[in-house]
Image (tube, rainbow, N blue to C red):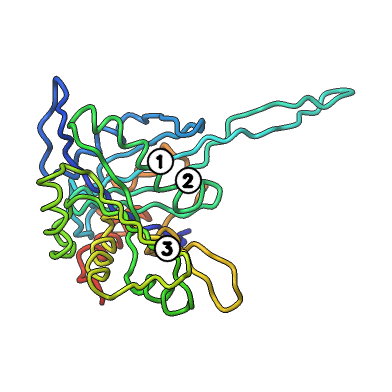
């Protein structure tokens, strides 16, 4: 049975470090392919005392009847280890045991456009926790292998920001976190400004923090709009601290407004070792689509279509 689930739409950026390691491999072409060094071989990593793992990532090869390109999409899962406390009954007693309970979420990497599509699952964590886990797992091997630092952010829409502004009577704080230029289609004005700064300071990120203790912070459409369009494509993040007519400060973030996409997936009971079997049977004469192929085809249609404004 095929169902549809909601996936977060993320973007990753790769920024060259100024201090070179003794041995550094040249960046692959396309540069987004650099993530493969981190997601191959079921690699495990730890973030804040919690163990995670990239599991089962392989190239998505289109079967007959599908036109998404090969060597572009990589499908697998990222999993978070939790401990399940179980009670086993024995004659005259209950013995408590602790067992591993891995929580997996389906994840797709598009190495050409540097997108990541990851299934939403409250058991794994909220969107911000999911983003930080993926970034942490990718960062160390890419830095060691290619001397590039990776940043992962959610794609959002400018409208979310301005809606927060229009719905609140007081604005206390605006914070913008901007990653140095990496993705070509981001806002040109913002790219040029950040590139000029990088040529002088060599920064990976630029953090802008504006505050007004009385809640009268002005947020003009320009130049803020240019930087919001830059962030919109996954090249940074924003947060606002506001107050509405009922009083009380509240923080709003771009992580709360990440774009999502509904993708078709197979039953969750599918054994992990069989998750891509149908996808790779390129010689199968039947044109019946596997859930995985349908999922990749939907992703491909999403990333190649013009962005709606």
Q: Do the residues labelled 2 and 3 touch (CB within 8 Å)?
A: no
- Position above or below: 176 against 96: below
- Position above or below: 2 against 246: above
Nearer to the camera, 20 or 34: 20
Residue 98 found in image quarter? top right
Residue 191 on image: x %, y %: 15, 59
What separation in Å lies between label 2 and label 3 (alpha carbons)?
47 Å
Residue 289 on image: x %, y %: 32, 58
- Left or right: 213 in relation to 9: right
Residue 44 on image: x %, y %: 40, 29
Nearer to the camera, 14 or 170: 170
- Left or right: 230 in relation to 4: left
Question: Which residue was labeled with disc 2?
Answer: 270
What separation in Å lies between label 2 and label 1 (alpha carbons)?
7 Å
Give residue 274's mark.
1
Would residue 115 be visible to someone looking at this image?
Answer: yes
**Helix, strand or loop status at disc 2:** loop
Of the two numbered discs 1 and 3 in the rendering, the one whose residue sits closer to the viewer: 3
């Amino acid at each position: 049975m095929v169902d549809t689930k909601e996936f977060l739409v993320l973007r990753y950026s790769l920024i060259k470090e100024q201090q070179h390691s003794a041995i550094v491999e040249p960046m692959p072409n396309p540069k987004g392919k650099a993530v493969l060094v981190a997601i191959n071989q079921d690699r495990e990593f730890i973030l804040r005392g919690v163990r995670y793992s990239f599991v089962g990532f392989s190239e998505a090869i289109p079967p007959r009847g599908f036109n998404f390109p090969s060597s572009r999409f990589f499908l697998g899962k990222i999993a978070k280890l939790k401990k399940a406390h179980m009670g086993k009954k024995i004659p005259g007693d209950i013995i408590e045991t602790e067992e591993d309970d891995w929580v997996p979420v389906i994840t797709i990497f598009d190495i050409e456009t540097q997108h990541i599509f990851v299934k939403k699952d409250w058991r794994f964590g909220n969107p911000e926790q999911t983003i930080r886990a993926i970034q942490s797992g990718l960062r160390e091997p890419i830095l060691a292998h290619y001397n590039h630092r990776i940043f992962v952010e959610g794609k959002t829409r400018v409208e979310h920001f301005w809606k927060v502004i229009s719905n609140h009577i007081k604005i206390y704080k605006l914070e913008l976190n901007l990653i140095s230029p990496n993705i070509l289609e981001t806002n040109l004005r913002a790219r040029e400004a950040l590139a000029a700064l990088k040529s002088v300071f060599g920064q990976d990120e630029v953090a802008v923090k504006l505050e007004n203790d009385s809640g009268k912070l002005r947020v003009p459409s320009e130049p803020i709009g240019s930087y919001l369009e830059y962030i919109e494509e996954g090249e940074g993040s924003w947060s606002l601290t506001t107050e509405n007519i009922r009083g009380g400060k509240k923080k709003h973030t771009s992580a709360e407004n990440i774009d999502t996409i509904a993708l078709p997936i197979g039953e969750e009971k599918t054994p992990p070792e069989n998750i891509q079997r149908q996808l790779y049977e390129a010689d199968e004469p039947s044109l019946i689509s596997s859930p995985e192929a349908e999922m990749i085809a939907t992703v491909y249609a999403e990333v190649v279509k013009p962005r709606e404004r």
